[in-house]
Amino acid sequence: MIPNGSAFLRAGGLCLAFVIVQVSCISQINLLGGGANIVPLYVAAVALYAGSIPGAAAGFSAGLLLDLAVGGDVGASSLVLTAVGYGLGRYREVRDPAHSLAPLPVAAVATLAYALGFAAVSFMLSSEADVSALVLRDTVVTVILNCLIALPAFVLVRRVLRPVLVVDPLERRRRRRGPRPTGPIGLRGIGDPGTQL
């Protein structure tokens, strides 16, 4: 991502919108005992399209806003989401996933990592933490619901951030051209009619 004022405004606006929608609407909807969580989807999308440093910054800011909005332990969500954003951004930088369905496994990994990491941090910070097998059921339901809404969330983030990205995520990888024909002694370009004088 190109670090300028437009990039910060776009990413900040998206962060604020995702946190507000999560806290005010989506957290109130329970399906099969669990609910969707779109904040890890925002962090994963920024990390997938912009890289590790913007992903970590998006994770920190989204986690801090989320902690302040729900009144939980300040820093718990931001710690976990910073690690999730950085890890997924490094995956993007090393592997460069170009498949159009890449958001599905990325969303599943981001949601699972956030749920397990947040549970671990909350368990370490709280002396009255409850441990139950229902937490695993809720985590599985949340991962499934996030995978169902991952593609629209990733498309929204991509469209908003596209003008400030260094590499256009919609650009298809160019196929390599085949090898150039060789001349009679194996030198490239000798047999090409365009190279003869």
Image: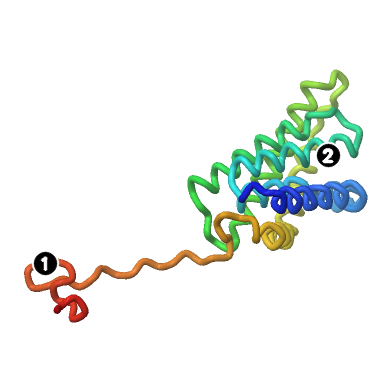
Between 23 and 111, the one lying in front of the other is 23
Residue 160 disc label: none
Question: Between 59 and 162, which is closer to the camera in this rendering?
Answer: 162
Q: Whole-percent x and y of residue 52?
A: 59, 42
Mark 2 nearby-residue class (10 Å; few <14, some 14–19, many ≥20): many
Q: Amino acid at mark 1?
A: Gly
Check disc 2 and report the residue beneath it: 65
Q: Residue furthest top?
A: 127
Residue 59 in the image: state x and y as whole percent.
71, 40
Residues at marks 2 and 1, CA–CA distance in whole angstroms: 64 Å
Q: Residue furthest bottom?
A: 193
Q: Is residue 86 above or below residue 162?
A: above
Question: Hey, which quadrant is residue 133 in on the image?
Answer: top right
The reply to whether residue 41 is in sight is no
Q: Is residue 121 above or below residue 39?
A: above
| In the image: residue 189, left or right of residue 60 | left
User: Which residue is at the front of the view, 106 or 167?
Assistant: 167
Which residue is pictured at 87% across the width and 52% down the height? 21
Q: Are marks 2 and 1 in contact (CB under 8 Å)?
A: no
Q: Earlier in the sequence, mark 2 or mark 1?
A: 2
Tell me which amino acid carries mark 2.
Leu
Quadrant that contains the C terminus: bottom left
Q: Residue at x 57, y 61 (%)?
A: 168
- Residue under circle 1? 186
Q: Secondary structure at mark 1?
A: loop
Q: How is the image coloured?
A: rainbow
Question: In the rendered view, does 105 fall on the left or right side of 17?
Answer: left
Quick one: which residue is furthest to the left in this view?
Answer: 185
Between 86 and 116, which is closer to the camera in this rendering?
Answer: 86
